[in-house]
Amino acid sequence: MRSHIDHLQKTTITVSDVPATKILDIRVQPGGFNDAKHLIEYGKQRNIPVIIKEFGE
């Protein structure tokens, strides 16, 4: 997942020549949030918002 965040940071994405807002939205298995929550801070450091939700939320 860190490599996905890094890739988003380095990639320029535009919509109608306007820079797009890039967000990584992740679904994890129930009980998996705590194992993945460090990615939120990793994304913040790279200006990529990371949303993590457990399946079924």
Image (tube, rainbow, N blue to C red):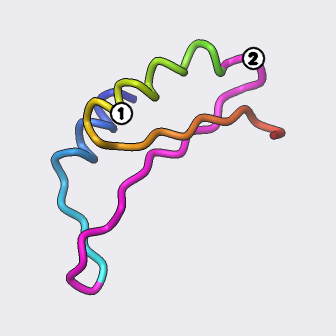
Give the Cα distance between marks 1 and 2.
Answer: 21 Å
Quadrant in the picture for residue 42: top left
Which mark lies nearer to you, 1 or 2?
1
State the SS at label 2.
loop
Q: As displayed, is residue 10 above or below residue 15?
A: above
The residue beneath circle 2 is 31
Say which amino acid is labelled 1: Gly
Disc tally is: 2
Residue toward you, 43 or 11: 43
Magenta residue check for 29: yes
Q: Is residue 18 above or below residue 3?
A: below
Left/right placement of residue 54 relative to residue 41 reads right
Q: Label 1 belongs to which residue?
A: 43
Measured as percent of width and height from the top left, residue 56 is found at 83, 39
| Residue at (43% x, 51% y) in the render | 23
Expressed as whole percent of the image width and height from the top left, the position of residue 51 reads: 55, 40
- Horizontally, residue 52 falls left or right of residue 45, namely right
Tag 1 near tag 2, CB within 8 Å: no
Please state the extent of the stretch shown in magenta in the rendering.
Answer: 16-32
Q: Quadrant of the C terminus?
A: top right
Disc 2 crowd, CA 10 A, few/some/many (<14, 14-19, 20+): few
